[in-house]
Structure formats: C-alpha cells, structure tokens
Image (cartoon, helix red, strand yellow):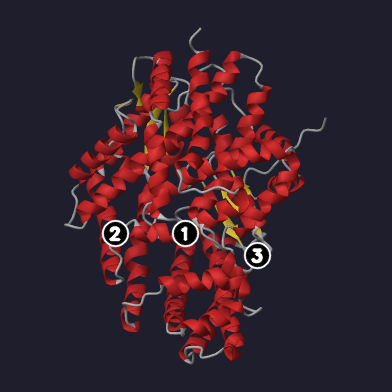
Amino acid sequence: MEKKIYPKVWNLDKVFMGGGKSSEFLDHINRLEALVLDLEGRVHSLITPLSTNEVMKVVDLIENVGNIRLYVSQATSFITCLLAQNPKDQDAAILRGKIAQKESRYEKELSKVKKILTYTKEDVWESLLETEELKEYRFILNEWRENADKNLSEEELNLISDLMVDGYHAWGQFYNDLVSGISVKILINGKEENLSVGQAINLRSHPIEEVRREAHYVLESIWKEKEELFSKIINHIAGFRIQVNSQRGIKSAIEDPLKKNRMKEETLNTMWAVISKYKQPFSNYLKRKAEMISGSSMKAYNFWAPVTKSNQEIKFEEAATLITEHFSQFGTELEGFVKQAFYEGWIEAENRPNKSAIPFCAGFPLTGKSRVFMTFSGTFLNVLTLVHELGHAFHNHAMKSVNALNKRYPLSIAETASTFAEMIIFDAAMKKANSKEEKLFILDEKLKRSVMNFMNIHSRFLFEQRFYKERNGGIVSAHRLNQLMEESIKEAYADSLEQPSIYSWVWTPHYYITQSPFYNFPYTFGYLFALGIYVKAKEKGKEFEKDYLALLRDSGSMTVEDLVMKHLGEDITSEEFWEKGMELCVQDAEEFIKLTSS
C-alpha cells in the first residue's frame, strides 16, 4: 500500500498569495474599505422604517452588513494565521491595525443600525419580519433590536468603538505577543533545550516525570517573574469592560457572555449544579491515577501523564490516516471534508520554535475553507487537539450555504462540533484496543477531558466570577489573583489536586480574549451537549449525518434552548438533560477504577 504524505505546513497562498506583502490581500482591504464607506453612506441617510413598503431598503442594508462581516472575517483570519506562524511578522502586525480600524468603523455603523431599528413601531416591526424577504433574518434582527445600546448616544458609541482599537483590544494583542515571545530552557534527556511556551506546555504529557516536573516549575518561575505585568494586562481588560458595561446598563460581567451564547442563566446554573453533584467519581479517578504514577494524591504536573507505556510516537501521516478512516465511518460529508483538509494543506502542524503556543481554527467564509494551527509533536494528545480543531473547521464547512448574518454561531455550539469530533476518535480507538493497557490509555485521555470540563473549566468560571466581583471595587493585585485562583481550583477540583498552578490566570489565554469574558463555560456546555448528540449518532449510524448538518446550520439562528428542543427534543433547563451526558462520563471513571483494581 502506497504511503501517503501530507503537508505539515499549511498553504496560506491559496487564501492570499504573498503573505504579509500580498497584493491580493491589499485588494481585499481596498474592497472592504469601499464596502464600509458604502455602509456609512447608507446609515447616514437611514430613517426608521414606517411600513412594509420599506422592506427592500432593510434587506439591502442588512445584506451589506453581512457582506462586510464576511470580508472582515476573511481578513482577520488571514492575519491571525500569519502572526501565529511568525509572531514577529511586522507586515502582518501593521495589517492587523488597518483591519482593526475598519472593523471599528463597521461596528460603529452596526450599532447605529441596531439603535435605529429599535425605534420601529411594534406592529410595523412584526409585519416586516413576516415578509418573505426578511423571514430568514427574523432571529438575528430581533436579537439586534433587543441588544441595541439604547442607553448610549451616537457620540458615546463612537468614543467606545475608537477606544477599543488601541486600548481594549490592544491589551489582548499585547498579551498574545508577550507569551509568543517567551522562550524557556528545559533539560530533556541530559540536554538543555530552548523551547517556546507551546513546546514547553506539550511536555506535560511527557512519559518521564522529571521532565514534566521541570517544565511545570520552569514555566511557573517565568509566570512568577512576570506576574505584575500580566496582572496589569488582565486588570486593564476587565476594567475597560466593566466601565463599558456600566454605560450600557449591563449589571454583571456574566450578562453579556450569556447573551452572546444565546443561553439563559437558568440553563448555565442547572449545568453547573449537575456537575457539582458528580465530582466524586472524578476525584476517585485522580486519586487512583496518582497512586499508579508516584503518590497518593494527584500533582498538577502529573495530570496529563500517560498511565501506561503504550504512549508511542504517532507520526503526522499516521494521525491523518487514523482520523480520515474513523471520520468516514460517521458519514461521507465528513470523510470528504477531512480528506480535503489534509490533501490541500489546511493544517499548520510543524513542531518548531518561534510559533504561537495556542492551537486554533481560522475560518475563511468567502472561500468556504478553514485553516488549523497547532504544534504536532507525536502524542495522542496532539491527535485529539488536531481532531478538536478539525471539528471547528467542519462546523464552518456545514455553514457554507447559510447566509452571512446567520453564519455566526455562539461559542457554546462551536465547542459542540469540536468535542463531537473527539468522541468519534475516542470511540474508534476504544473498539480497536486489544489489551488492558490500551484501554486504560484511552480511558485516561477521555477522563482527562471530563476533568478539564467539570473541574478545570469550573475553576476558570469560579475564578472569573470572583475576579470581576473584586475588580468592581478597583485593581486586583497579583497576590490576590493568585489567592483567587488557588481558592477556585481547590473548590472546583473538590480538593483533589495537589500543587496546582496558582498562575493559571496568567497562562490561560482565554482570560485575555477581548471579544468576550467567561470564555470557559461554553466548552463544558459543548462537551456535555456533544455527548448527547453522539449517543444519537451511534443509534442512527450514517443516517444521522444529515440531521447533524441540519443542527449545525441552525446553530446561528436560534437560542441554544430552542436548538436542542428542535433537533433533540430535550429541555436543557432541566437537570435530567445534563445527567444523561454525565452518566457516560461517570461510567468511564468507574471503568477506569475497575480496570486498575486487579
């Protein structure tokens, strides 16, 4: 059988030829500028609709808004990819500033549009949404109307938008640049190696405990050395957000992310309540794993450690073949998609220094393709990261036929597609396992995901809740941030993790994402939601792929409660829904204890 060779370095020239000096990309920027100018002109002459006779005026306007969003997304994704592969790319950094300015102007005009629409009389509004031309935009237009900044004048909206570019968002970019520029020296097999943060973090799954421990404490010393700088960054990001929320009449930091995730607070509280009830099985797993490795309690740097010696190196080509084979058993659409991703060079996987530490998927909606970024060093954990990001890319693929305004889905649903992809690989690997050691290895990786979602992400949520509460009263010191992190980890892990990283607030990039606070609970939501979907997929086989694609396509045009009710017939404000997914995870924990008891 002929051995397949897949590129490990992505092909960005198929998006825009020439990287940061691309003339094609400059043409794209010029086209975006023309679209923004056109929108500014339209909004300047826009008046509140008075009857359904003005429906085409509204249609033209929102289609222009949607078109700009596609152009901005295409440009932002390209620049993100350039800076990830080379954080010192000055051309890309300059382009990032240009796009940020145009996006800021676009957001200003969009805020004006939303505000003008709020003045439409209720009967006229309902009549407009019933027209054939606007029916498919009903959800997003109602969302605009409900979330419009009614409390702010046009001048205040413009000021906030201007400040976001070089103030608010700049802090988030500064954080990414700072982390990307850090290198650490770690002793591996008697040889000192100079590694990026991403490469050092990958050592958490190294089979030798001394390497894991050293990587952990070397990074901890770096974070301690720079904690004051990072505390300034996180305080400035949170402080700006609190001030803007206050002006907009938003009372708590969680209110905005709930709206963006199209989720009720009742749903979120129910999910965490169920998770809090089921901590013990996962505490038992951590204790048993610790006993297998080197002690009676789980040390933080041993959490990702392999429990058996079956942690062989997996070559990138082998990973590609494995993923393609198992995705094909789920459906032809997913199989064709993943083959295209590997053959056409969508994936940046090369293990090299001086690249970003953060894996991601970047969507290019104008061309209907994506790019996946990661560092592949040959572990099963890397395979799962690759699969996770390909899940995001498949979601983008499913949305190709959806109109521009309905393409944007909430973070909670985005994590569903990625987690669902992981489940395919886990299930397939478990079926192929021929020994107790292999089964333990796979179960351990699955349980790591459960612990991450039910304990680690819960700690992030608790930390952010407490941080914002204290930040309302002023700057929170680095010392106090460490305390809050330690308290949150202790509670979320039910006191079953020893020597945790109190600097998790430093190296967890999600706290520094300026698009949204609480970039944590969507992962847990997506994880449990994906488990429920996967059960149905196993019941129906390849026939389910059509239903799955329909669910993904609807993900940008309804609340999560309505989406689940429509496609699964479930009420997610009830504990019963969440307990179904939780039961599968508890079974994994019990199976792990059983297999390690003999």
User: Is 4 situated left or right of 406 in this image?
Assistant: right
Please tell me which of labels 3 and 2 falls first in the chain: 2
Instruction: Provide the residue designation for mark 3.
Output: 402
Q: Residues within 10 Å of mark 1 (few under 14, many from 20)?
A: many
- Secondary structure beneath disc 2? loop
Residue depth check, mark 1 versus mark 3: number of the one nearer the observer: 1
In the image, farthest residue toward the top: 598
Residue type highlighted by circle 2: Ser
Q: Report the front residue among 90 and 326.
A: 326
As drawn, the label of residue 252 is: 2
Q: Does 160 sit above or below residue 360?
A: below
Q: Which mark is residue 262?
A: 1
Vertically, is 117 above or below 74?
Answer: below
Instruction: Name the residue located 60 percent from the left edge and 53 percent from the top edge.
Output: 371
Q: Mark 1 or mark 3: which comes first in sequence? A: 1
Q: Looking at the picture, how far across and down is residue 171, in whole percent?
A: 33, 59
Residue 77 seen in the current view: yes
Q: Is residue 387 visible?
A: no
Q: Which secondary structure lies at badge 3?
A: loop
